[in-house]
Amino acid sequence: MKRIVCLGGGPAGLYAGILLRKALPAARVEIHERNRPDDTFGWGVVFSDATMANFAAADAPTHAAITGGFHHWDDIAIHFRGERFVSGGHGFAGIARKRLLAILQERARELGVQQSFQHEVQDCEEFADADLIVAADGVNSRTRGRFADSFQPDIDVRKCRYIWLGTTQKFAAFTFAFEQTEHGWFQIHAYQFSPDLATVIVETREETWKAHGLDSCNTAQSIDFCQRLFARYLDGHALQSNANHLRGSAWLNFSRVSCQRWHHGRVVLIGDAAHTAHFSIGSGTKLAMEDAIALTRQVAGGGDLQAALEGYHAERNLEVLKLQSAARNRMEWFENVARYAHLPPPQFAYSLLTGSQRIGHENLKLRDPAFVAGYERWLAARAGVAAARPPMFLPLTLKSLQLENRVVVSPMAQYSASDGLPDDWHLVHYGHRALGGAGLVYTEMTCVSPEGRITPGCTGLWNEAQRDAWRRIVQFVHSHSRAKLCLQIGHSGRKGSTQLGWEESDHPLPQGNWPLLAPSPLPYLEGISQTPREMTRADMDQVRGQFVHSARLGVVAGFDMLELHMAHGYLLASFLSPLTNRRGDEYGGSVTNRLRFPLEVLQAVRAVWPAELPLSVRVSATDWAAGGLSDEDALAIATALHVAGADLIDVSTGQTVPWQKPVYGRMWQTPFADRVRNETGIATIAVGNIYEPDHVNSIIASGRADLCAIARPHLANPAWTLDAAARQGYLQQWWPAPYLSGKSQLERNQQRAAAPGPA
């Protein structure tokens, strides 16, 4: 490789130039930057302690120079409604962005990298003889735009405006402060990056920014507004801008950038040109410099360039996606401060600290044990218990129902019934999980009629034999455990008459199919599934009556709680989604019309279900498909269900249409439960890849949901909750008396496993 050109002289381009020059000393390495050497937007750059180890290995002189200019701090301070909360152990370091650029420029000169400033590159074809072109030209990358068909960028312009300022005020901790105005909330992200200077980023929602007239203010007027609003934190120090060289407003929208591909021929993207991460996580420069490390490693291997660029993308893409996911969570938290402003100040602070989902309860406890211990005491006092405990073991009251803890055994279809009748398998299945320590155990979706079953193996509750079989299970659970039992009832709709779950799922039975009903005659799998009949008013009356009949039987069977299944594309969910409800009458069209029949069912069931017992509704808060349920629809549906008698919303997502595109990950559906709970005030259950005690503790402690439903882990370990209690040293967890001899041994073994040093 003879010639390498880096487009952009920010940290990404400079660090790439340095590392490529070191790895390929025979190559001419050039950096072309459109601004002057010391022009920069922004003030300080933040790195975590963990990040610096990568830099040390990549280029020790650069690492030494950067760390020599660091300003360190460990604490995060949060100011909200007149209270201040401090959490330590976070390990950050800041450096002036100008200082960082100067270090990188000097190191590049030492290595013989050619640097050209005030050079506006119009087209990378200007460098026709370059073997490799590294596009480090930032969030507004001209190169990415030039080859958009290849890179396939997705640019999401976000809801907040921010202005990046500096000050001589000293901040002892990374500081978040929130101020409410007549038009909405403003917040600052402030941190010291040198002995004399600190960054202050002021952020607010676009509509709040406009309502204050900031869209028509110049930089000086904007600074004056921010100084007055955050005066109590500035102690008389002025705010300053260094963005005067930029054209237009100093207020920006954050753009979340991702690309399907990171290279096109000999052109490769790094840093903000390829991806962005919100500044609340402070990782944009980190990601860019780590991109440079990975790119150099791949290119310097000496093999085919295209294979090297493919390797670079493969190596970095997953790590970037993980950090972008965390950054998205934190970004959305700051976009929706009003959603969390109702929380008590201690919980608001905890919610902020854990908002990215990268820092959970256990990690926060490692960083600052005293902070978490104090917070657990506060949670315990609010829950009415004498001593602090892990949040997942806090009790919960729903109407007259008292739950031991916040762990729920999620509904899991067993496909093992005959003619809807639960048998000994179900007795053992539900009984075993009730003995495992969870506060609430759900039945699988129990169907309200033979034709409402998903498969021939689904349980039902439409006759007295089924009622009595369920009563046997309920009596066992009540006699031998402290768990409560929730009956979930539903109707399969267009997704019925299919094979068992471990056969060809969602496909029709080879023979013996029964007719299907749905709001609209749309098959689930086009060309494969049976086409359902569009429901008439008489059909609706019949189905509503079937739900009422099942609920009455559930009362006699002795269930503690009832849930209506209005999710996952089954009958009632099919009314709610515009993708499956194409009706032209009063039951289709607007969300109000689509709600009409599901609300009829809920109101009729609520009328026969005991008033003192809770009733829940499971919903899909998004269809994960274009044209499906909107965020506004989901909130409107939850609110209407609550008004009609639902005490709890069990928030799931998707499974409405087979072409859905969900975004998976840890606790991936929790943000939907969070939104419903904190924007409507309705209690929620969070579901979806919640599999560690830390997940449950973090969700409950932050107020993102009231209960956590756990599915697959309970299939593998029915005593998941008992194990979680032992692992956390919570000795007050109830155990079945015949199993008590195993309790102390499990607790000792878990404590021994958690202790440092050899076993």
Image: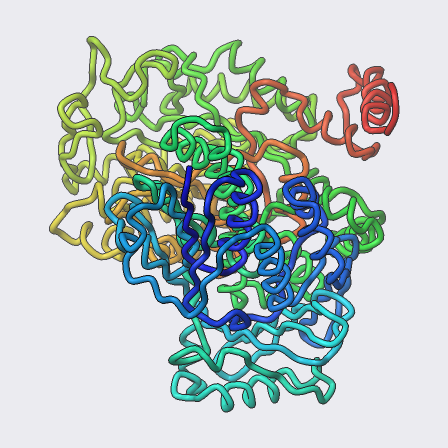
**x and y, in percent, of residue 549 in the image:** 36, 32
354 shown above or below 546 = below
Q: Is residue 367 left or right of residue 327?
A: right
In the image, residue 410 sits, relative to residue 185, either above or below, namely above
Write the residue at 25% across / 18% down.
507
Left or right, residue 638 beside residue 755: left
Quick one: 108 or 721, which is closer to the camera?
108
Q: Is residue 376 above or below residue 198?
A: above
How far across and how far down the image is residue 517, in percent? 20, 31
| Residue drawn 63% across the image and 56% down it | 351
> Foreground: 156 or 47?
47
The chosen color scheme is: rainbow
In the picture provided, is 565 more to the left or to the right than 225? left
Q: Along the line of sight, which residue is nearer the eye, 426 or 168?
A: 168
- Can you see residue 331? yes
Question: Residue 224 at what x, y percent from top left?
Answer: 56, 90
| Residue at x 42%, y 87% (from the top left corner) | 213
Question: From this viewpoint, is residue 555 visible?
Answer: no
- The answer to whether 680 is drawn above or below residue 476 in the figure is below
Query: Residue at (73%, 42%) from the top-left corner?
Result: 362
Residue nearest the viewer, comparing 60 with 208 = 60
